[in-house]
Amino acid sequence: MKKDSCEQLYNSILSKVNADSCECTIRQDTENLTRFANSSIHQSVRSDKTSIHLRLIKGQKSGYSSTNDLSENGLEQLLQSAMLVLENNESDEELYPLPKASEYDTIPFPYMDLDPAFDDPEQRANIVNSYCIGAQKQGVQAFGTVSSVHRSIFIANTNGVKAYHSSTLAETQCQMMKDTASGFAQSSSPFIKQLETERVLEESLWACLNSMNIQPVEAKPYEVILKPEAVEDILKMLKYMGFSTSAIHENRSFLSGKVDELVFDPDLSITDNAWDARQIPLPFDFEGAPKKTVPLVVDGVFRNLVTDAKWARKLKLENTGHGLPAPNPWGPVPMHLVLEGKKQRSQEEMISDCAEGLLITRFWYANPAHPKKAIATGLTRDGTFLIKNGKIQHAVNNLRYTDSLVKVLSNVLSCGNIMRLHDMTVTPALHCKNMNFTGQASS
Amino acid sequence: MRKWSIFLLRKGGWNELKKSWIENTLHQAKKSGASYADIRFEHSKQESMFVKNEKLEAMESSTDQGFGIRVLIEGMWGFSSSNQLEENSVMHTLEEACAIARASSKIAGPSIELAKLAPVKAEIKDQALENPFAVNANEKIELLKTASSNMKIHEEIAVRTANYRARKLSKLFASTEGSWIEQERTESGAGISATAVGNQDVQVRSYPNSFGGDYSTFGYEFVRKMNLQSHAKRIAEEARALLYADPCPQEHLDLIIDGQQLALQVHESIGHPAELDRVLGYEASFAGTSYMTPDKLGHFRIGSEMVNITADATIPGSLGGFGYDDEGVPAQCVYLIKNGIFVGYLNSRESAHHFNQEPMGAMRADGWSKIPIIRMTSINLLPGNSTLDELISGVEHGLFVSGIKSWSIDDKRLNFQFSPEIGWMIKNGKLDKMIKNPSYTGMSPQFWSSCDGIANKDHWHVWGVPNCGKGQPMQIMRVSHGTSPARFRKVKVGVVQS
């Protein structure tokens, strides 16, 4: 949906609003996804959704409602519904005003794939075909996805905010399998033709072909080399367990009371940066407030929180533009994490540095076991290898870890020199001194 | 171009919704080369309320509507969906679905065929007695605020939450085989949670279940029966006591698992691996595969003699129940595990044909915008003969655990690790001291084979789980699990040490 059409829709809603202030969010998502298994396509889908989210404020009361019924009657019902919620709501002494109009930078580089191939199911099928041919040559089978998503968001309010952004994202994941052996790799880009499909094919095949003869190892603490996908899993788990501002404020997080304290390895820094060229940029949050770059962890020291309009007011801090769609009782959370380190090494160098340890492709089904202590549990998947004397020896069975992820990231020996983006998280590989494995899993 | 509102079109029933319009679309699908096609319209209305520390933090209503078209062309599926309810949008969406199927058919692969199904014309009515949307908003807010207030027993109960949600869903399914099925349902549920912070620890207790409570396809009468207010003080006291409780010992001991946690155990270690699309490898790169492979069907022992597990979409009020699935297959009750032996799968028409089975009705989509995939219905551990007291009295040294805190299971659904909210040691057949951070781990068949006691039907409850995730794009499904507490011998506990 173009900005003009959004403005037109907003103005028609605004003309019927009987409230002190109003915020309207219009979202359009077009999603294409092709799944393949056993080296053939088994599912290919497209969905096209447009929705309107309305927030009304009158006195100290607010009302929220949303719909994707864009008919005249549907919009009429949306207004009635939001007003009914407002009337039934309670007066809120802490109700904060909607954000004011504020300049936000436009994205300095193009992030829109306008090539017709972006939406073309044949383009996705061709990528799948390249994986299947590669798999067939090696006597294995290919599984995974190719997707392309186009999102537009328009946020306007009666305080003058009028923000619009549109972007595209293409992703592919490929898992190669034969019997109990498997390998995995993935790639993301705003442009479908810039997906690193050859690298994905090569890496997933390598891990699968080298996992044919799995030899069991004991569950115990190991030195680990985590590939970027595994580091992404850890970072997202830490975000979930501890980077929420409300969790930190309510003393529920492993970061509570630790501002300006060394929490992670001094080599590591974690930034929330929606402007990073390696990210899928977003210039404003879901209240239309400009996104600020927030250094969360600098040289291992926890420095800053993210805020939205409500929490900035509550904590008397600047609004960093991390509001989620309203109503949001959970508060702001960082959305565009970038983890970086200083002691950079290639994956080959990390392996040669390792006397004994594990090379881990990715983790699976991680969940917090004790959020306050950042303890989580999860399993290795799609290629876990034993390293001895600086060389990969053989593949091992999947293992379950149960450990404090803060502890794992407090003893970092080196960081990879290649950063990978997935799910709005940019991570390198990490070589960590110690990770505790507590059980054997299926291989 | 005229825009249609499903709400308006539904006045007087779905039959008013341009029957000819739908028939033309299906006719056009056949003309475009589809050997099979279906179209599904959905309209839903939702409301939710969330109270945190006695304050109404969020109240919202929403409406969602749209349609999805699925076609089978040259042996490949194509699916497209839209909420643009314009007359030409449906035809455009059909064209997209056809183009997707044709693009997929260019990659060599097995041609999809469907198990036979007789066409159905049916209308399924709502089971709710009390329409939750008609209950005064202030009454619902007051219920949540009172429950929150009743948890305020000490300053260490730092976060007190109470939430309620309801949804009214109407669906129309029509296929080129002549099926025309209209279904309506109401879903409602609620829950409370107390988070204690102190003694350098954080502990949570919930009622009636963790992660949002319990849900059903009954009306607001289901929420009233929960009696949230009267359980609030107890869970707050338990959450606080957990801050100062002893940690879980590390050993192998006898374990009794309460209904909520056992529902999760059934879900993860029996329900998911029984999905036939996982067995076919369709979920391999994401959700994983399954240890319940076809070569084991009919003879592999997964549990002890007393373990009987059904997939039953016919249980009245169950969140995983329905009249017909999203392929038009009628709701059924089938055994997955009978007397401990693996005997059945959750299937689709496609996978049923592949394995020469009868379709049992497990294909569901998370709304109009998603293609149906195999989902759990209500997966139930059938009750045994014991009382809970009898189960406990049969344990000399053991642990009783309740509530759900954390879970993890491998991609074949074999190795699992669960952390319930709370535990009590059992000593000489009696509950003893409270234990914090209980955890247990095992391998699915060995674990279920160690089951030697299941509580009777008086303890049996169907737990509504509104948040089962599977598929790409991710689909969140409403499922349910009937369970009563059960006893397992010599289980490894205390894996998570804080």
Image: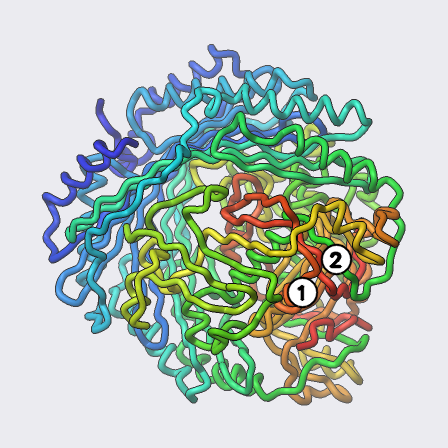
Which residue is the site of mark 2?
A224
Q: Position of residue A202 (x, y in %)?
A: 72, 32
Q: Earlier in the sequence, mark 1 or mark 2?
A: 2
Residue B40 tag number: none
Q: Nearer the viewer, residue B71 or B487?
A: B71
Task: Tell me, yes or no, whether the two marked residues, 1 and 2, touch with CB atoms within 8 Å.
Answer: yes
Q: Amino acid at mark 2?
A: Val
Can residue B178 be seen here? The reply is: no
Q: Secondary structure at mark 2?
A: strand
Can residue A109 be seen here? The reply is: yes
Q: Chain of mark 2?
A: A
Which residue does the image show at 22% across and 69% down from the upper left? A90
Which residue is the site of mark 1?
A408
Describe residue B367's horizontal placement relative to residue B104 as left or right: left
Q: Is residue A334 above or below residue B43?
A: below
Describe residue B251's horizontal placement relative to residue B200 as left or right: right
Q: Nearer the viewer, residue A34 or B170?
A: A34
Q: How many numbered circles are shown?
A: 2
Q: Nearer the viewer, residue B240 or A210?
A: A210
Describe residue B417's horizontal placement relative to residue A358 as left or right: left
The crowding category of the residue bearing disc 1, from other C-alpha atoms within 10 Å (few below 14, some 14 to 19, many at least 20), is many
Which residue does the image show at 40% across and 62% down from the upper left? A306
Q: Chain of mark 1?
A: A
